[in-house]
Image (spheres, helix red, strand yellow):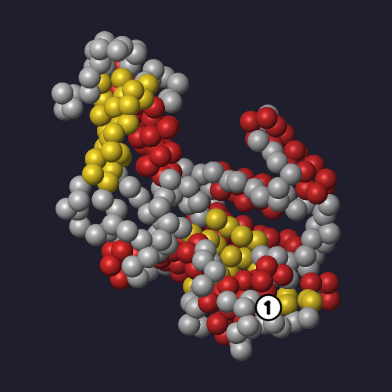
Amino acid sequence: MQLELEDLEYQRRAIAAAVKVLRGQIKNSFENSNLFGIQANVSDLTAEQIEENKKAIVAEHGIAEEDAKLSPDRDVCIEMETGTGKTLVYRRTAYELYKEYHLTKFIVLVPSIAIKEGVLQTFDDFEKPLADRYGFSPACFEYDSNKLARLRHFIEDTQPQVMVMTIQAIAADDRIINQPGRDDSFNGLTFLQALGQCSPVIIMDEPQEGEEYANWLKSLAPAFGRLLTPDGSIVIEMGNAWEAKRPVQSLLSSRALIGFAEHPDAGLRLCQEFVCYNRARLPSPAQWVTVNRIRVKDSYTDMEFLSGEFSEKFVPIGFI
């Protein structure tokens, strides 16, 4: 069964806004974008021209510049609600950028394997409808460190390419893509350095994943604030979190607590912080504690005691 490609106005506007950021850009060709075998995206726009393009876009959509939070960085953040088709929108944006400017290198960075699989499935579902509409189909593939020949082809090829990869694939120095001095290196560069010279359009899908939990906890603060009695209190046990596939403890729980405690509509205060130590807790995270043995057992959690209006008489329930 072939999925039907809807042409929704809000999606067209989002795609057009992204394309217009490069308004005035020259079309890429082999002659102006190939350097020592690396086929790159090139731009002749100055920072000032891109800034003017951004200002024109926000004005066109009736958005105040202070609300748009414009910055001189060559980044564009397009926010769309879940279920509105953002994956299809940025997929079509890649088509439009190739059609308009002949940009050929696109990398989709995702925070997890689950999201990566969802992106690849969406790309596969709409490959034929998009090919029918545009008359061409960019090669789309999943980065695999065991298939570096495919990565080399991405760097060299003159046709449009979309590579989907997780952030973890490039986040550590020991990743194959970061390793210098390999026999299969590209002109003496690491593969990541060679990718950098391609100047790819990098699309970050769900960069805020994990922040959803922090935002969810923060959203509960006003309700707790309203429910608290004058002598009431809140005790939250904040579990620890670790970054995916890395021996690095995440600050997510700390950010979540700060967002909850400092919500302007909740009127909460952090009265005291306690440490709950459990020496009998199972070794975790297992990969770094029992397998690689480069971290010690994560055997504590934080207990946060919060209240409304401050009173010296408040005692956290359960600690009496």
Q: In this view, does 1 lie above or below 243?
A: below
Q: Position of residue 204 (x, y in %)?
A: 55, 55
Name the residue furthest bottom: 183
The quarter of the picture where the C terminus appears is top left
- Whether residue 114 is visible, yes or no, is no
Q: Position of residue 163 (x, y in %)?
A: 55, 70
Q: Mark 1 points at which residue?
A: 189
Q: In this view, does 176 lie above or below 72?
A: below
**Observer-nearest residue: 53 or 282?**
282
**Observer-nearest residue: 72 or 153?**
72
Q: In this view, does 115 lie above or below 75?
A: below
Q: Which residue is drawn at 63% across and 31% down?
A: 67
Secondary element at image label 1: loop
Q: Quadrant of residue 186?
A: bottom right
Q: Is residue 247 left or right of residue 162?
A: left
Q: In this view, does 2 lie above or below 183?
A: above
Q: Residue at x 58, y 76 (%)?
A: 179
Residue density around tag 1, few if under 14, some if 14–19, many if 20 or more, within 10 Å: some
Q: Where is residue 70 in the image (x, y as percent from the top left)?
A: 69, 38
Q: Where is residue 220 in the image (x, y as percent from the top left)?
A: 33, 29
Q: Which residue is drawn at 51% across and 66% down?
A: 172
Q: Which residue is drawn at 25% across and 12% down?
A: 313
**Callout 1, which amino acid?**
Leu
The quarter of the picture where the N terminus appears is bottom left
Q: Is residue 70 left or right of residue 119?
A: right
